Amino acid sequence: MKNGFTPKPGKLMDQVRETLRFYHYAYSTEKSYVQWILRYIRFNDRRHPNQMGKTEIERFLSHLAINRNVSAATQNQALSAILFLYKEILKSPIDADIRAHRANKAKRMPTVLSRQEINSICKHLSGKALLMVQLMYAAGLRVTELHRLRVQDFDFDNKQIYIRDSKGSKDRTSLFPEMLHEMMRKQLEFVQSQHSKDLENGYGEISLPNALSRKYPKAGKSIGWQYAFPSTTLSADPRNGLVQRYHVHPSSIRKSINLAKSKTTISKRVTTHVFRHSFATHLLEDGVNIRMMQTLLGHKDVKTTEIYTHVMSKNLSGIKSPLENL
């Protein structure tokens, strides 16, 4: 946060929203931060944050861990929201170490589907749902990355997908296998047709990331910036009121996956993220080196990538169990 942005005088939560939008935080993050700040204030008898500090923050975070049994990730998000409030809106950064009771960080191995299980689920999918699942598995996409893909993010010539402004505000490229090109071309042709109709009806403009609309005011109506998997309906952007065709809701692909899984004999819990885990694990099994996997997955630390080495299928043929020697 280098620009030293100061929101307009007004209600505290309006200032929070204005500042988050200035720094181009995702709308989902905006909603989460606002809710955490409100919960922090309510927990402390609705006192103004200017009258509180490290002690109240620690008490609130400890309450979340002990009484609400939240995960470590949830507790960290609450802390991030509160620190953002003090640093960016109140201009009183909390520099001291926060010594709250920390939520336990679960050490779970990622769930990975076998190649046969991936095939089994795909056999019970069709159309757009099949394409979306295949893209998550083919490129190691998070579900949010899948939904945020724009028409221009598909490079057919170089067989790459561009993932923009991903987790940690980083861009990266990943794999776009040729076997998906025909289905993807048909999907993009559908988007083009739908976009043309929206333009004829006075719509067709989409919100651009990172204030690009100020630099390129006409880009929002171009086909390149339209979502590759658009919603079936138009809706108003809650931040600027622009009526647009947003991307399809994440719940739709989750429902399709759950329905497909119910038609198989798979007992594992299958979420959208399982396809990203399976992508990483299967490529490591195929001999792709860990540093390349780190790049494809967009991990900041290679240690995050190394967890997949623990769930790789090991070749145990030729190794006898001690039971066999009794």
Image (cartoon, helix red, strand yellow):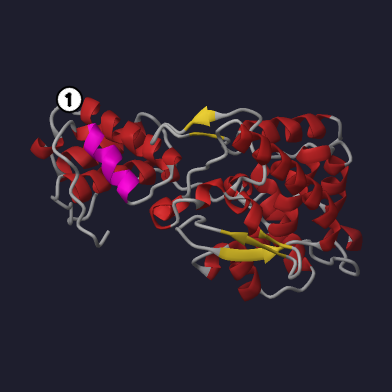
What residue is at 60 percent from the left and 30 percent from the top? 201
Quick one: SS at disc 1? Answer: loop
Percent of width and height locating residue 289: 68, 75
Q: Which residue is mark 1?
A: 46
Q: Residues within 10 Å of mark 1 (few under 14, many from 20)?
A: few
One can see residue 196 in this view = yes
* Quarter of the figure with residue 121: top right
Q: Principal SS element in the magenta part?
A: helix
Q: Quadrant of the N terminus?
A: bottom left
Is 20 covered by the magenta stretch?
yes
How far across and how far down the image is residue 94, in percent? 18, 52
Q: Say which of 255 and 99 sits in front.
A: 255
Q: What percent of the width, then of the height, locates residue 63?
A: 30, 33
The residue at the point 74 percent across, 40 percent down is 268
Judge from the rendering whether residue 65 lies leftward or rightward of residue 3; answer left or right: right
Q: Amino acid at mark 1?
A: Arg
Query: Residue sitting at 84 percent across and 46 percent down?
Result: 117
User: Vertical placement of 25 versus 41: above or below?
Assistant: below
The range drawn in magenta is 13-22
Q: Is residue 295 above or below residue 267?
A: below
Q: Quarter of the image holding residue 199?
A: top right
Image coordinates of residue 79 in percent, x first then y, are 31, 45
Task: Examine the structure image and report whether residue 320 is included in the region drawn in magenta.
Answer: no
Q: Quadrant of residue 203?
A: top right
- Which residue is more in the foreground, 143 or 72? 143
Q: Residue furthest left?
A: 51
Res. 309 visible in picture: no
